[in-house]
Amino acid sequence: MSLNYITPEFEIKRNYDRCISCRVCERQCANEAHIYDEDSKIMLADESKCVDCQRCVSLCPTHALKIVKNECAFRENANWQSDTIKEIYKQASSGGVLLSSMGNPKPLPVYWDKMLVNASQVTNPPIDPLREPMETKVFLGKKPSRPERNADGSLKTDLPPQLELSMPVMFSAMSYGSISYNAHESLARAAAELGIYYNTGEGGLHEDFYAYGPNTIVQVASGRFGVHEGYLSAGAAIEIKMGQGAKPGIGGHLPGTKIVGDVSRTRMIPEGSDAISPAPHHDIYSIEDLRQLVYSLKEATQYKKPVIVKVAAVHNIAAIASGIARSGADIIAIDGFRGGTGAAPTRIRDNVGIPIELALAAVDQRLRDEGIRNDVSLVVGGSIRCASDVVKAIALGADACYVATAALLALGCHLCRTCQTGKCNWGIATQRPELVKRLNPNIGRERLVNLMTAWKHEIKELMGGMGINSIETLRGNRLMLRGINMTEKELEILGISHAGE
Amino acid sequence: MKRIFVDEKWCLGCRLCEYNCAYSNSGVVGMSKALKGKKIYPRIRVEEKGDTTFAVSCRHCEDPMCSKSCIAGAITKKDGIVRVDQEKCVGCLTCVLVCPYGAIAPGENGTAQKCELCIGNSNSSGEPACVGGCPNKAIVFEER
């Protein structure tokens, strides 16, 4: 290989007045960016290997480290920005498709930040959640549109299967394989403690986690990895994954290097073989085909479990969702273009799909217009970052939200976006045993429970401010939202008024 | 009585415990000032073999062999803590030989030193420094 044109992206700044050469940074860096020089007894660095995951920064006992953006810059050019230039160098040297991880980092509009929440003043009282009861419980599944009565006049109460959530948030799909055993254990235990659900993703369910089945959503995706009768019955609900926000229209590829030991057994594929999920489900080419799978899964589980259909937010999402609602699915999950991933082609991640806010508003409206909104619950994901995003999503019409990136951040992820390398220094997106053990699920569970508990408090505060004491009353209550810095068209799609109106 | 326990399942072998121990027992404020350019003599040590790492420190035995074997009468057990009187220790290191856990080692001046649960040290924070500084809760301080 000739000259490498790519300059290191980051600079490791070490304060030598503070550094005591304890070598923690060296031991903790799976990328081997830190080097101890025996002769001079000082720490050196190979910055070309640094991914800015900040593991060394967090563990340095004397706070001697700082990772900063490398100041070495190409001549400024608004059209040819440095990332673009570097990507060209990379492809010119490798000849390959660019890969990246986690959500779309491009500066595209975040509509959550352009929506403001209402509060009560004078004419209607706000509610203090610390003094008065406040309900955040939601049920996901088909609901009757009107009360129905039996012949003797008593109310019919035999509802289709429902998922009961203590708060309108769930952990979205991340497969065992893409994330570690300890990450899964943290999510499973936290979901059980919080009274919410986590999702297996397409990797099957590790035998140790069957115990958390009542809080597990089991996924059936295009590769059908790890799917068998026991798996379907183990979960509280079954999710058919048609698409993912980070990479709509393409499948998945877990490299053979990650298919080791338990991952191989759980996925039911040989060790070392690449796990390739096709882009389509080869048995689903229409809504009618989807209906067959929905009912096959219901049949296999005696109609006791709700079936979720997950799709990426794409251009025709309202029509697609309408079709899904008619396919017999109980819940539709929509994943926006900012959703995370363990690996996706960069071009797809950064350019395909639409914002979840617009997709949600369009879908909710379409289902209402068609009179089928109560036939399904709506779950949205794709970068729900905080409690106010949850509240805005509910007000736009969602029944609940899926979060994954926020959950990983709670576990230690620093969004260095190099999951695809399998060298996660935080023990999350890796299968290397010495790295996996860095995530102690006792700590992970606690941090996830803390995060969700904090969000729940904030959701209650926001609801209380609006004078609303039940999250169900907020759902689809778009009068509680106002837009700012938006065009007429954007406001029209979101179905909200501009601030001041 | 609370004691230090280590779970090898979560020990990462990062050796922060060794440095936190050395700092806690240095009596100096500021870790860089205390340890920069110095060889450390920690009272907890990470043992490593293959993929297994495990921090070892004094168990504060019921009937401590080190105390029995000490020719100078420097090692005594009081309030559940086994301590070495640095004034009395003559540095014969018999205790090092008899300790079944390898938890005693000579310090900088050649006398024996060991973990004395550094709760009262000026730069400790209410729990032994190795416990507070362990990034993965592999070292815990609890009643068992």
Image (cartoon, rainbow, N blue to C red):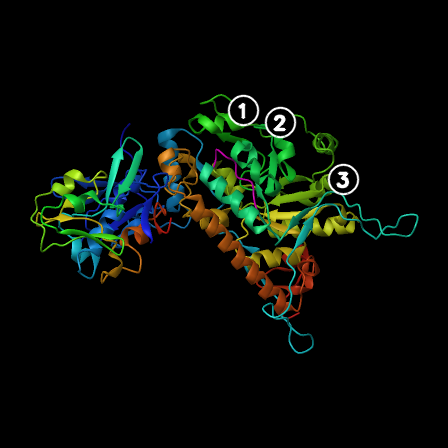
Residue at mark 1 shares a chain with residue at mark 2: yes
Report the residue that reaches farthest toward the top: A270
Which SS class for mark 2? loop
Q: Amino acid at mark 2?
A: His
- State how far apart marks 2 and 3 are (Cα): 26 Å
Quarter containing the N terminus of chain A: top left
Q: Is residue A101 visible?
A: no
Residue tagged 2: A228
Magenta span main SS: loop
Q: Which comes sooner in the sequence, label 1 or label 2?
A: 2
Q: Are marks 3 and 1 in contact (CB under 8 Å)?
A: no
Label count reads 3
Label 2: chain? Answer: A
Q: Which comes sooner in the sequence, label 2 or label 3?
A: 2
- State how far apart marks 1 and 2 are (Cα): 10 Å
Residue tagged 1: A268
Residue tagged 3: A326
Q: Residues within 10 Å of mark 2 (few under 14, many from 20)?
A: few
Q: Are marks 2 and 3 in contact (CB under 8 Å)?
A: no
Q: Position of residue A45 (x, y in %)?
A: 23, 43
Which SS class for mark 3? helix
**Span of residues in magenta:** A171-180
Quarter containing the C terminus of chain A: bottom right
Q: Amino acid at mark 1?
A: Met
Label 1: chain? Answer: A
Q: In the image, which disc is placed on residue B68?
A: none
Q: Position of residue A362 (x, y in %)?
A: 68, 50
The residue sitting at 69% across, 50% down in the picture is A139
